[in-house]
Image (cartoon, rainbow, N blue to C red):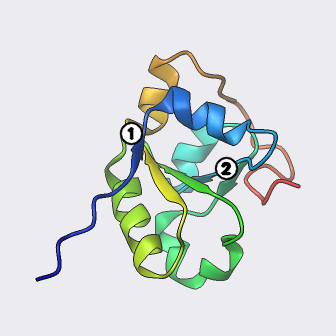
Amino acid sequence: MNRPMAIPALDPLYADIRRRDHVRPALLLDVRELDEFRAVRVEDCLFIPMSQLGVRLQDIPRDRPLLVMCQSGSRSTGVTNYLLQQGWEDVGNVAGGIDGWQRMGLPVRRGPVEPGEGQLPG
């Protein structure tokens, strides 16, 4: 009998540490919709709305760890599970989403989205 796979969940503080790792930095994948992203976002994330995920899978790198984020952690749990089923190996869900991120006092950006924001960071 196959057991359901547990969805890896990361505390926002640990997620922030993982994305700043000098050896193998994780990429933050924001799967919220555009209006949510415009309101508040994390710098240097890849923005692919959940509604576009199916047609943009090729835009998600497979060669680095991924940390998936939504508003509260619900949608990103589903996306994390989906990516794992599609063959991504090092994927985790940011528990609490951007709400939890902000509660922890981690940096966010607000205001108009600048050119290049939400695109794959270099």
Left or right of 120, for residue 97:
left
Q: Amino acid at mark 2?
A: Ala
Q: Residue at x 55, y 15 (%)?
A: 105
Looking at the rendering, in which quadrant would you find the N terminus?
bottom left
Of 88 and 101, nearer the camera is: 88
**Element type at marker 1?**
loop
Where is residue 10 shown, x and y percent of the image? 44, 40
Quadrant in which the C terminus is drawn: bottom right
Report whether residue 40 is seen: no
**Residue 107, x across and y down, in percent:** 66, 23
**Residue sitting farthest toward the left:** 1
Residue visible at 73% across and 47% down in the picture:
25
Residue in front for this viewpoint, 11 or 38: 11
What residue does disc 2 label? 26
Graded by Cα atoms within 10 Å as few (under 14), some (14 to 19) or many (20 or more), the crowding at tag 2 reads many
Q: Left or right: 77 with respect to 52?
A: left
Q: Which residue is mark 1?
A: 95
Q: Residue 81 appears in which quarter of the rendering?
A: bottom left
Instruction: Say left or right for 15 vs 62.
Output: left
The mark nearer the N terminus, 2 or 1, is 2
User: Label 2, label 1: how many angstroms apart (C-alpha)?
Assistant: 15 Å
Q: Secondary structure at mark 2?
A: loop
Image check: 32 left or right of 22?
left
Rendered location of residue 115, percent (x, y)? 87, 50
Q: Is residue 93 visible?
A: yes
Above or below: residue 88 compared with residue 94:
below
Q: Nearer the viewer, mark 2 or mark 1?
A: 2
Q: Which label sits on residue 11?
A: none
Return the x and y of residue 52 as percentages of the image width and height: 54, 74
* Tag 2 near tag 1, CB within 8 Å: no
